[in-house]
Amino acid sequence: MSTVKVHDKQFEVYLSEAVILERVKALAEQISQDYAGKKPLFIAILNGSFMFASDLFKQLHIEAELCFIKLASYKGMKSSGNVVTSIGLEDDLFGKEVIIVEDIVDTGKTLHHFLPKLMHQQPKSLKIATLLHKSEATTYPLALDYVGFDIPNKFVVGYGLDYDGLGRNLKEIYQVI
Ligand code: 5GP
């Protein structure tokens, strides 16, 4: 299927399943080399990163831990857009080698606000792995350690990413037409 409709919008294939999986495997190889002899903790950010996290984790050939968290932004009852809390982070990060797993970094705002909270727990190291990066759109300073694909500043769905709740199950990544 080269085009799909999700809600009111039409999307076309941008990255095929084979291309994604090949790149994910290469990232896993690189991470396995970089973390040889260490036991990193992968912290995958829900919901979008579940598929990437799963495929990346499967391809690792080192010992590693994985947990999933959700980020929430609240100001009173209203979302401020600034991440203030994470749900589901039970591990103590002190002294750990931590790798954040994201589906996509757009403006960089989410991670820019969240990373200091993790740093507060004094992990031994903290790196970021993101499948997609809209580098043209990134305005918040952020060092990305592992990037799958640098993509244009256009809305994408599939492979875990949604458009208003739908499209996550698509095996490919689609770009809005
Ligand atoms: P940020 O701007 O903070 O870097 O990106 C925050 C979040 O916006 C991402 O984690 C992702 O959930 C969402 N996002 C940004 N660009 C896209 C996109 O093209 N498609 C989808 N489905 N979500 C996006």
Image (tube, grey):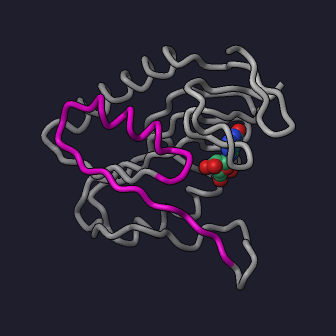
Q: Which residue is drawn at 70% across and 80% down?
A: 75
Residue 55, x across and y down, in percent: 38, 32
Q: Looking at the image, is 167 positioned above or below residue 78? A: above
Residue 159: x %, y % from top left: 56, 33
* On screen, residue 166 above or below 95: above
Residue 39 counted in the magenta span: no
Residue extending farthest to the right is 8
Would you identify the image quadrant in which residue 170 lies?
top right
The answer to whether residue 65 is magenta is yes
Specify the quadrant of the image occupied by residue 132: top right
The quadrant in which the C terminus is found is top right
Q: Position of residue 93 (x, y in %)?
A: 29, 65
- The picture places residue 174, in percent across and down from the top left corner, at 69, 26
Q: Which of 143 and 35 is in front in this view?
A: 35
Residue placed at 47% from the left, 69% from the top?
A: 87
- Position above or below: 131 against 84: above
**How many numbered badges does the structure rendering display?**
0
Q: Which residue lies furthest to the left in this view?
A: 37
Left or right, 42 with respect to 84, comes to: left
Specify whether 56 is left or right of 159: left
Tell which of 91 and 141 is nearer to you. 91
Magenta range is 45-74
Q: Residue at x 48, y 66 (%)?
A: 116
Q: In which quarter of the image is residue 138?
A: top right
Q: Pick whichever, 169 or 161, lies toward us.
A: 169
